[in-house]
Image (tube, helix red, strand yellow):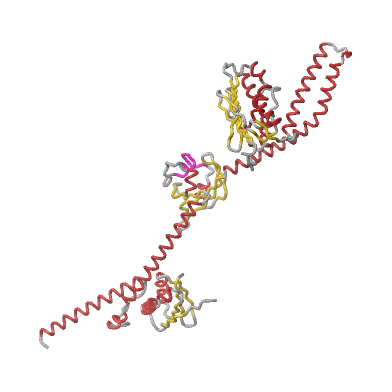
Amino acid sequence: MERTVEDIVLDIRGQICPACLLITLSELNNNKERLKGAKARMIVKTDHRDATRTIPGAAFAMGYSVSVVQKDRHYEITLEHEK
Amino acid sequence: MSSAGKIEEKDLRTSNERLKKYIRDKVNHLLSVMGTKPLGREELDDSTLIELDPIGIIARSFAQVLEHQKETNRRLTVAKDQLQAVFDTAGVCISIIDEDMRIVNCNEKQKELLVSPDANAIGRHCYEIYCGKDSPSLDCPAVETLATGRPVFIREVKKKNKHFQIVTSPLKDSDGNVTGVIEVSMDVTEKKKAEELMHQAEKLTAIGLLAGGIAHELNNPLGNILGYATLVLKDRESGLAPEHREKLEIIVEQAKKGSDIIRGLLDFSRQSVPSFSDVAIDGIIGKTMRTLQNRFSSQRIKTDVALPGALIVRADPRQIELVVLNLLLNSIQAFEAVSRRDKTIRVGASRDGDFVRVSIADNGPGIPGEVLPGIFDPFFTTKPIGKGAGLGLSICSGIIKEHKGSIHVSSEAGRGTEFVFLLPASGAPHPVETR
């Protein structure tokens, strides 16, 4: 049976750095256990281009795998804890 | 408010401003560490800044970074240990060599085969430690890889009397410059020996077939020559002149010699099938010694025989007699050019595991080292022309191998020669391969 992984969606469109990074880090800290246990992944929606550099850099150092996908008017950064 | 109160309030405000500036500076310092922009006062006022607690957020994030770092280190240590175990237990020699041809690291197999137990290989030149030389060989694959930056696939190189098949790969830095070489070597010495033995066996088989064919073809005409010459010699009415009779006797004698050589060739080509039975080795040796008693006496050769008895072998007694006879005759002939008084042939037999070991040794002139390797080859002889066809020892070797035994020779110039052959003891498990 396939395991279901909860998506924690963080919509920070309209925010700019460093607020984007601080809000994302705060949510990664708050949801640390669920993310680490691979029960959830975080999807960050941002329209601030700098955030596609700062968030992946920090998240990678914390042990998360990162993927960035460009949508129509924003970016989606998916953060999953490495097994 | 009193003037004193106003001063206290002003001091407190100044102190608060200093503290808020300190917090903002530290937050911005931490944000720059995280690779992002500083927080502008217009973005976040002081009270919201304290409420958001960015220092706390970054501190908790750093805790995750450290946790991840710790886990990564643990995994790296496990991977390193696993890699080291693979490195050390690999059945091949692995060596890492730098651009100056100095050894950076090598595995246990490399140390076992090519590094002296008391030598510290790390940091020393590979050609000095592995090859025992002052400079690299011209065909060294590591030199080639360092020079060309390209791998060398399977080159056979001899190091310290062992044969190796070597593969080398370059080590490069991030700019693509060659910084060293990984050398992987496989010891193929035993494989090479087996190939040489196989080659030798094939050669012997071919020579055996050829010899057998020639022997058959020559047997009949030689038999006719011998028969008719004998008939003429026995015919009293032939009226042969004495000088013709003498010449005819030479023909008979030479034809007999030819027959002997043909018999040897037929034995060599294994035309006679061995008939195995349980026989006492001391009986075979004793019988053969007795037939040579006159030769021992006439050449004043002392014999020293140590046969414990009760050593039963599974063998064809006639063929083993032939082996013992050949070895004893070799020793007797070796003494012909020796004038010493204490000429001795020692013959012994003993149990050696599942085998019976027979030793025939003399204190004759010995066999030169350069001659020894070919001594069991057919038609190999050091005797003068007419004194031997060079088939005796190859026949002995063939017979012993057919008995699933082995035959060896050791010799020292001026001190003598010892031949040792092993035959399966009766009742011993049938050997799978020749020892």
Q: Position of residue B86 (x, y in %)?
A: 49, 54
Q: Position of residue B96 (x, y in %)?
A: 47, 50
Say which quarter of the image contains residue B33: bottom left
Q: Position of residue B58 (x, y in %)?
A: 34, 74
What is the span of residues highlighted in magenta in the rendered image? B125-137
Q: Residue at the top extreme?
A: B242
Q: Residue A69 versus residue B398: which sits nearer the camera?
A: B398
For the C terminus of chain B, the image quarter is top right
Relative horizontal placement of residue B70, taking residue B250 as reference (left or right): left
The residue sitting at 34% across, 72% down in the picture is: B32
Q: Position of residue B325 (x, y in %)?
A: 67, 26
Relative horizontal placement of residue B363, taking residue B17 as reference (left or right): right
Say which quarter of the image contains residue B199: top right
Q: Residue at the bottom extreme?
A: B1
Say which quarter of the image contains residue B11: bottom left
For the N terminus of chain B, the image quarter is bottom left
Relative horizontal placement of residue B122, taking residue B257 as reference (left or right): left
